[in-house]
Amino acid sequence: MIRGQHGRILVVEDEEAIAGPFSRALEREGFEAVVAGTAAAGLELAERTEPDLVVLDLNLPDGDGRDVCRALRRESDVPILMLTARGTETDRIIGLELGADDYVVKPFSSAEVISRIRAVLRRTRLAPSDQGPIEIGAFELDPGARLARLDGHELALTRKEFDLLAELARNAGQVVSREDLMARVWDVNWFGSTKTLDVHIGALRRKLGDDPASPNYIETVRGVGFRFASPKVVTP
């Protein structure tokens, strides 16, 4: 199978009135579009075709798209853009917490979604990895290998969790504003709530064993942002 000029996009969407025109729009823009109409077919095609990004509908005839997202995340860090007819902040946060990279509410324009796809692919392909490994107490992070360890044990992180942790660790000892974190880890043009940042910070704290009231690693600087501990503060 020949990959499109800009990459292969797996569209998991059961409505032909959406999947057909959207896949053709992708192909006009230089992508290869692979379409699945069910959750089972989506998982099978994800494994077989190794897409560069998955566009995933939440409402599928044989299952919930969130379960598909969980299954994909157990096997891969492929970027996921979720589609849903529901537009509440809670739905959006749940999707992002499961590891989705972006969230689009139906009805949508193909041009808007393709623009978001390009932005997600740009961020994932150009993720900073030029800095060497970072060691702060019992915490280690290797940006190039995309590995993080605590007490020698690898942390199970989603891609977004890793990117956020890496951004904080690269600026260890310095406050990074909420706005900067959203721009660098999500999108410079992010227009939604920053609640997803709090969700991801909470997940990182749990995985680092951090007590929010007295954190060893991620400190909240109220009204500004977050600060990762400096090497002088945390010791093995």
Image: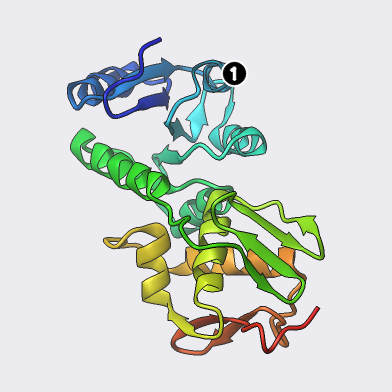
Q: What element carries label 1?
A: helix
Spot the residue most to the top. Answer: 1
- Give the image location of residue 210, x and y in percent: 73, 75
**Is 143 left, or right, of 115 in this rendering?**
right
- Give the image location of residue 224, x and y in percent: 44, 86
Observer-nearest of 139 and 24: 139
**Is 212 left, or right, of 60 in this rendering?**
right
Observer-nearest of 4 and 211: 4
Dividing the picture into quarters, in which one does residue 18 lie? top left
Q: Does residue 62 appear anywhere in the picture?
A: yes
Q: Does residue 193 appear anywhere in the picture?
A: no
- Give the image location of residue 70, x and y in percent: 63, 39
Observer-nearest of 142 and 66: 142
Residue for badge 1: 40
Dividing the picture into quarters, in which one does residue 208 lie? bottom right
Q: In this view, does 145 lie above or below 150?
A: above
Amino acid found under the numbered disc labelled 1 = Ala
- Residue at horizontal 46 percent and vertical 53 percent from the top: 92
- Residue at horizontal 48 percent and vertical 55 percent from the top: 129
**Is 183 left, or right, of 168 in this rendering?**
left
Q: How many marks?
A: 1
**Is 125 left, or right, of 217 in this rendering?**
left
